[in-house]
């Protein structure tokens, strides 16, 4: 049975859930998982429904048939084939922990994505990327060539058919133009000490202040540096016994986990933009299962 999901955003009103459930039942579909949220502050309604087609209807035909209901409720909606893997481009500089973690998760089938390219402003990870049969592009970035470099980056994104850019510790600031063009399609990861500890060596700054929690934040990239809508966060506890290098190592671990969870949520169409915030629904049963180990 083919599995699909439907995502819906609209103004909250009576009858939305009933209309969606009735439509799917009338078109031979069985709902397997459903999440919804009413934002009482904004009056917006968000819903994600996983379902199987028992009659062979495809998501294109369902989308066309759903148009009348969507118009009646003023919905923004999309039908997604859950068997299709989202194409992503990873961008990295010289910290490779997130890149290597993502390569492994994709290899064992733990992330529903296809890495179609890796872009870096250094050559450090060319070999590991090529050994995973993924195209590697080294695009140097300076103040003088930044517009040309970003044009080259966007060419890779467009020619590869990528739907998402992942900044896996890419240590270059993207232009406002690129952030606007790819709004909602760039995910970043960084430590959660901001705004307290800025600049170089934030973990050493945290150590000097006796911080007891190390965290990481993954968010959509906007023109406001590190202030885009947050998708995922997590922390790890530390004590006075840890050294500055321990801080860095623990920080790497939590960054890798948080970025992977953010990508998983986005690729499974579980993230909805809600102004400066996000609505992130829980994963459907079985969606974390890996195809294989090792």
Image: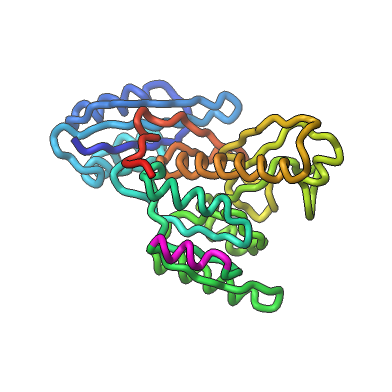
| Residue 79 on image: x %, y % | 32, 42
| Residue 263 on image: x %, y % | 48, 45
User: Which residue occupies 42% across, 67% down?
Assistant: 135
User: Which residue occupies 34% across, 36% down?
Assistant: 6
Give the image's coloring scheme.
rainbow
Q: Looking at the image, which is closer to me, 68 or 117? A: 117
Query: Which quadrant holds residue 149?
Result: bottom right
Position of residue 170 relative to residue 108, above or below, is below
Q: Which residues are magenta?
A: 124-132
Would you say residue 130 sits in the magenta stretch? yes
User: Which residue occupies 59% across, 77% down?
Assistant: 148
Left or right of 248 in this view: 207: right
Would you say residue 277 sits in the magenta stretch? no
Position of residue 154 relative to residue 112, above or below, is below
Q: Looking at the image, which is closer to me, 159 or 209? A: 209
Left or right of 269 in this view: 19: left
Residue extending farthest left: 55
Quadrant of the image for the N terminus?
top left
Asked if one can make out residue 102 in the rendered structure from this viewpoint, the answer is: yes
User: Which residue occupies 64% across, 64% down?
Assistant: 175
């Amino acid at each position: 049975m083919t599995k699909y999901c439907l995502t819906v955003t609209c103004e909250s009103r009576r009858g939305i859930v009933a209309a969606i459930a009735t439509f799917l039942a009338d078109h031979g579909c069985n709902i397997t998982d459903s999440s919804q949220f009413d934002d009482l502050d904004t009056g917006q309604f968000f819903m994600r429904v996983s379902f199987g087609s028992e009659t062979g209807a495809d998501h294109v035909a369902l989308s066309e048939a759903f148009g009348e209901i969507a118009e009646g409720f003023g919905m923004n909606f999309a039908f997604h084939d859950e068997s299709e893997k989202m194409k992503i481009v990873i961008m990295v500089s010289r910290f490779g922990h997130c890149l290597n973690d993502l390569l492994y998760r994709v290899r064992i089938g733990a992330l529903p994505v296809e890495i179609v390219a890796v872009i870096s402003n250094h050559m450090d990870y060319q070999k590991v990327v090529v050994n995973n049969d993924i195209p590697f592009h080294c695009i140097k970035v300076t103040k003088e060539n930044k517009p040309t470099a970003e044009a080259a980056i966007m060419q890779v994104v467009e020619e590869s058919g990528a739907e998402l850019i992942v900044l896996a510790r890419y240590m270059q600031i993207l232009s406002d133009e690129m952030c606007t063009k790819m709004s909602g399609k760039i995910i970043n990861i960084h430590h959660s000490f901001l705004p307290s500890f800025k600049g170089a060596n934030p973990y050493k700054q945290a150590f000097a202040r006796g911080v007891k929690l190390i965290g990481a934040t993954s968010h959509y990239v906007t023109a406001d540096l590190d202030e885009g809508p947050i998708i995922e966060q997590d922390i790890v506890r530390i004590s006075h016994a840890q050294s500055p290098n321990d801080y860095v190592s623990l920080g790497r671990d939590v960054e890798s986990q948080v970025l992977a969870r953010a990508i998983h949520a986005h690729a499974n169409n579980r993230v909805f933009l809600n102004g400066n915030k996000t609505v992130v629904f829980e994963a459907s049963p079985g969606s974390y299962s890996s195809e294989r180990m090792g």
